[in-house]
Image (cartoon, rainbow, N blue to C red):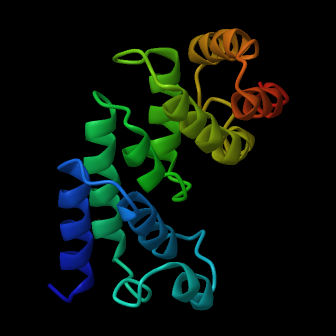
Amino acid sequence: MTDSKGIIKGLLNRLLAGERGNLPLHLALILEASSPLKNEDQHYDALLPSTFARVRVDPDTFQETIRIICSELSSNPDAGLLFAVSMTGSDTVTRLVVDLLVSPPRPLTINEVQQMLGILESYLPFALSKNVNFVNSSLQTRLSSVLGQLSSSSDFVIQRHVRNLKKFL
C-alpha cells in the first residue's frame, strides 16, 4: 500500500476503527498538505514520519475522505475525528461543526467542544465574509446562544475561542 490513495484509505480505516495516538495528526497533516491551505513541503517533512511526509491525495480522494469522516462525525463527534479534518478549511466541515455544536447527537466532552470551537474560530469568520448566509440566521442565533452558555465555562481554551468567535457573530 504505497500509493497515496491506499495510504489515506488505510489511515482512514484505522481512524474509524478507533485507533488514536498520532493517527489523527498524521491524517490531518496529509489532508492539509493536499488542500489549498498547504504549507511548504519542509513543514510536513518535519512533522510527519518519512513514509507520510510527501503523501498528497487528489481532490476526489480528499473530498471523499472528508465526506466519510463527516458522516461518522454527524453521529459521533469524537475529538480524534474532529482533529483529522481540523486543518482542511473545508466548508463541509465548518458547516457540520456548527450543526454539531448547536445540536449535538450526545453530550460533548470538553476536548470535543475545544476542537469544534477551534475549527469554527479558524474558518467560520472567513466563510461568513465570503457568504453572509453561510450559516442561516436561525442557526446563527442558536450558535450565539450556545456560545453565550459556553462563555461561563471554567475551561480557558473554551473561553478564548468563545471570545474570539463572538466578535464575528
Residue at left 69%, top 29%?
158
Q: Quadrant of the image for the N terminus? A: bottom left
User: Residue at horizontal 71%, vertical 47%?
Assistant: 126
In the figure, is residue 96 to the left or right of 3? right
Measuring 30% from the left and 31% from the top, which residue is drawn there? Answer: 76
Q: Residue furthest left?
A: 1
Q: Say which of 56 and 50 sits in front.
A: 50
Name above or below for residue 116 compared with residue 31: above
**Placement of the C terminus among the 4 image quadrants:** top right
Of residues 57 and 42, the one nearer the viewer is 42
State the image coordinates of residue 157 (x, y, percent, origin top left): 72, 35
Q: Is residue 103 above or below residue 6?
A: above
Q: Is residue 89 left or right of residue 100?
A: right
Which residue is depicted at the point 41% across and 63% down?
22
Is 30 situated above or below 156?
below
- Residue 61 percent coordinates (x, y): 28, 68
Residue 92: quadrant of the picture: top left
Q: In this view, does 55 lie to the left or right of 140?
A: left
